[in-house]
Image (cartoon, rainbow, N blue to C red):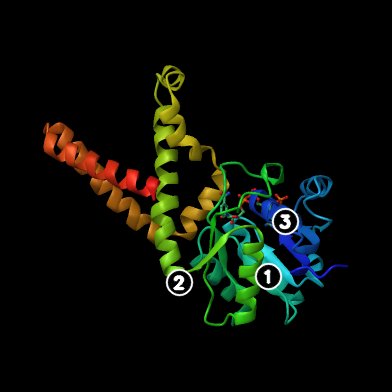
């Protein structure tokens, strides 16, 4: 067998992110064998027939045995349970990483299971995704030219950090490092808050009597703004609770700004409205051009 970056990879949770990672690594020739692990035999067999994984196991402890890399790509609410399932089977040279959208909760889950954290544990989060779920939605190019944040721990061995970096680089991604706290605050602002706004807006409209007419007039702008409200409700339930403090801070700040906007409309405060819209347009234009 050729010398690939990873000899035997276990992906626990072969959905959109886990499936896309497996596809990208296979396409790059960076892995010899991919073992899929999950709860549902039908999903895993589907992943195998699609060529995303080579073999599968519903016993997660069995699945990780003999693997040099294990990636947890399950919902945040399932992380602790999966850590507990793999704990008795971890070998010294087995690198463990995850793709969870919030990081402090994953480390807490690991600490609850392991006590002292394994030196081969390197948390991560790909800043890439879609509103779709499941292995059928996965594709090899998902991480191409996208950022992957890794949040190495004080306990993480340098060689493990490096191998996780190489894995994502093999998928065409750019790897950046941040602290866990910084990751969770930034993601609350750039991803978690916008998902709350999209869900809240669509739900408000969906509960109005005139909803059929409202949605029939929904054009491009509304579709763009609300696309992420089609994301998996269970996954977003987990993210909200996992990143509770940072998300609440952003929601309170945004609610106060929205109240100001509402007051400006009530008071016909043209200056406030024009200044707010101009400042936002400038920021959006610069961010898109950049
Ligand atoms: P997904 O498509 O729904 O895949 C999740 C997978 O986890 C499924 O294959 C599911 O398989 C498996 N699973 C669920 N509970 C499990 C359990 N208790 N034990 C074992 N397997 C379990 O979700 P995803 O979008 O790939 O998200 C996975 C992770 O990536 C989440 O932590 C999310 O925060 C993170 N993430 C998502 C995005 C995004 O845009 N979607 C972006 C970045 C990071 P079975 O049902 O067959 O068990």
Mark linked to residue 179: 2
How far is the residue under mark 1 from the one under mark 2?
A: 25 Å
Mark 3 → mark 2, Cα distance in angstroms: 26 Å
Residue annotated with mark 1? 84
Q: Residue at x 24, y 48 (%)?
A: 256
Q: Which mark's residue is nearer the viewer, 1 or 2?
A: 2
Q: Is residue 144 visible?
A: yes
**Left or right of 107 on screen, residue 251:** left
Q: Is residue 119 visible?
A: no
Q: Quick check: is the Cβ at mark 1 less than 8 Å away from ligand 1?
A: no
Secondary structure of the residue carrying tag 2 is loop
- Where in the figure is residue 249, as x and y percent of width and height? 33, 57
The circle on residue 22 is 3
**In terms of sequence position, does the residue under pointer 3 or pointer 2 come before the other?**
3
Looking at the rendered image, the disc whose residue lies closer to the viewer, 3 or 1, is 3
Disc with the residue nearer the chain's start (1 vs 2): 1
**Lateral position of residue 189 relative to residue 139, left or right:** left
């Amino acid at each position: 067998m050729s010398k690939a970056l990873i000899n035997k990879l276990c992906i626990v949770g072969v959905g959109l992110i886990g499936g896309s990672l497996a596809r990208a690594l296979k396409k790059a020739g960076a892995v010899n064998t991919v073992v899929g692990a999950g709860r549902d035999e039908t999903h895993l067999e589907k992943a195998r027939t699609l060529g995303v994984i080579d073999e599968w196991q519903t016993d997660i402890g069995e699945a990780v045995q003999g693997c040099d890399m294990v990636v947890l790509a399950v919902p945040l609410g399932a992380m602790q349970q999966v850590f507990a399932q793999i704990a008795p089977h971890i070998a010294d040279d087995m690198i463990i990483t995850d793709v969870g959208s919030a990081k402090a909760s994953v480390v807490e889950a690991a600490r609850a299971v392991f006590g002292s954290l394994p030196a081969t544990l390197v948390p991560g989060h790909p800043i890439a995704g879609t509103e779709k779920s499941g292995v059928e939605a996965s594709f090899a190019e998902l991480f191409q030219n996208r950022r992957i944040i890794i949040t190495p721990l004080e306990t993480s061995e340098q060689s493990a950090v490096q191998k996780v970096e190489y894995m994502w680089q093999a998928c065409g991604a750019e790897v950046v490092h941040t602290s866990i706290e910084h990751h969770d605050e930034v993601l609350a602002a750039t991803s978690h808050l916008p998902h709350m706004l999209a869900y809240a807006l669509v739900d408000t409209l969906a509960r109005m009597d005139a909803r059929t007419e409202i949605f029939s007039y929904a054009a491009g702008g509304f579709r763009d703004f609300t696309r992420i409200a089609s994301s998996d409700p269970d996954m977003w339930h987990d993210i909200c609770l996992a990143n509770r403090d940072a998300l609440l801070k952003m929601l309170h700040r945004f609610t106060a700004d929205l109240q100001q906007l509402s007051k400006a409309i009530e008071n016909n405060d043209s200056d406030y409205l024009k200044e707010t819209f101009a400042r936002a347009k400038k920021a959006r234009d610069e961010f898109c051009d950049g």
